[in-house]
Amino acid sequence: MVRTIKIFDTTLRDGEQSPGASLTPEAKLLVARQLEKLGVDIIEAGFPISSPGDFNSVQAVARLVKKCEVAALARALPKDIEAALRALESARKPRLHLFLATSEIHRRYKLGKAKSEIVRLAVNAVKQARQTLDNIEFSPEDASRTEPEFLLEVAQAVAAAGARTLNIPDTVGYAVPEEFGALIAFLRQRLGREIAISVHCHNDLGLSVANSLAAIAAGADQVEATVNGIGERAGNASLEEIAVTLHIRRDYWKCRTNIKLSELYRASRLVSIQTGLVVQRNKAVVGANAFKHEAGIHQDGILKDRRTYEIIEPSLIGVPESELVLGKHSGRHALNARLVKLGYRFREDELVRIFERFKDLADKKKEVTDADLMALMEETIAPLSETYTLEYLSTVAGTNTIPMATVRLKKGGETSQAISNGDGPVDAACKAIDQITGLKARLSNYRINAVTGGRDALGEVTLLINVEGREIPGRGVSTDIVEASVKAYLNAVNRYFQHQAGSAGEETETPSL
């Protein structure tokens, strides 16, 4: 009998806690829309009490999402519960996710509370939430380092109080598959089907996916994961790795998910671009090298039958395979037809704007591939409302020449221009942007990636700027690598100003489960 494993996606909550991965409210909605299209069962939209911005984002996601559950995180505190429930008022399928630490080290050093007090607080929190909502999930934080018998006591208590789901977090990635599976089997056997069991595994030892799969084998009903495995420290269990593993080896696992696998690549790209976190080339399933073969023996086998060295068809996860689809003479209808085939749909006014961007790109490139189109769409429909827009860029560089840049930016109805020199054309342009914006930013990470091949490849630049100790991601795309770099830098600057505008008010530290 095939079991269906629920996927609880926490990209917008735990995933966003990755250093340098701040998402604007608009970006969260774009990602939420893609997660719904991907087919996740639950979207954890955020931690409402943490800041006014997060509260508003959870509210917005709750209004937007219709097909899957929307969860909000709350500590076992009355004010947290009240804030989370208010944020979820518009959700068609709301879920409240409560948590309270239970391990001995957390009880002693973080909370300073006895076991009996922990049980009392957990039960009171569930009962308070149940007065408004019956879909309650409870997480004993640091469960994998909690004494099993006490963990069971807490689980039985919250189940009796009305919690529907018990989530077992491996908060610091301490567990190994055999013992984690045994812990889940122990809870499953003692709790029966009184309450659904979920797991939330971190990747500090590189075992988050293995631990999640071990939990599934032991009877877990749900796994919590993030797109690309992003999250606190070394990240969380990778959603795409779990979903594809259960599909490819369904003969072994006898389990399935509701994930639409053909949307995985698009989800991976979208999250990477919006967070600024580049996917490592050799990452399983969605990495750039996942379907590339270098060794001659492998290439020979692939030419004869792909199954000799490939267990995943690229089309399974939505990797674009067609090439040379459009050029500068292509019309708007041809572009629209190709975009529809790739899964994009736009209003007529949006298509006009996209067509203009396409023609600009086609003038620079002889051939526009599906990968180019996806990169263009990601930039064109990016939700960042720009504070500053690039009006003009000119750089001078060369042997025995001092690199200089002239940059003109527009903000509202006003245009400002600055000229600066630097160590190179990119450095000079960034300094000119700093002069206009008044921001003192330091470039802390810079990466160039060719979206497609050839001399006229579309280049993608991702970077991090450091402003007052805070890392902000940025991204830019162009056939000119200097222009792409300046776009990326300006993108990060705009993200900084939007974050400043959206996070006014007191903030509460967001936890890692």
Image (cartoon, rainbow, N blue to C red):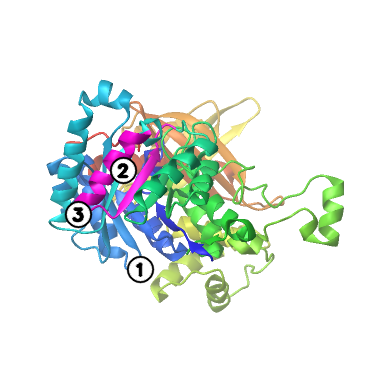
Q: CA distance from mark 3 to mark 1?
A: 18 Å
Q: Residue furthest top?
A: 109
Earlier in the chain: of badge 3 and badge 1, it is: 1
Earlier in the chain: of badge 1 and badge 2, it is: 1
Q: Residue 193, can we see it? A: yes
- The type of residue carrying mark 1 is Lys
Q: CA distance from mark 2 to mark 3?
A: 20 Å
Q: Dots 2 and 3: beta carbons under 8 Å?
A: no
Q: Which residue is mark 1?
A: 67
The residue depicted at 22 percent of the width and 26 percent of the height is 111
Quarter placement of the C terminus: top left
Earlier in the chain: of badge 2 and badge 3, it is: 3
Mark 3: secondary structure:
helix
**Which dot marks residue 87?**
3
Mark 1: secondary structure:
loop
The residue segment tinted magenta is: 148-172
Q: Which residue is mark 2?
A: 139
Foreground mark, 2 or 3, reads: 2
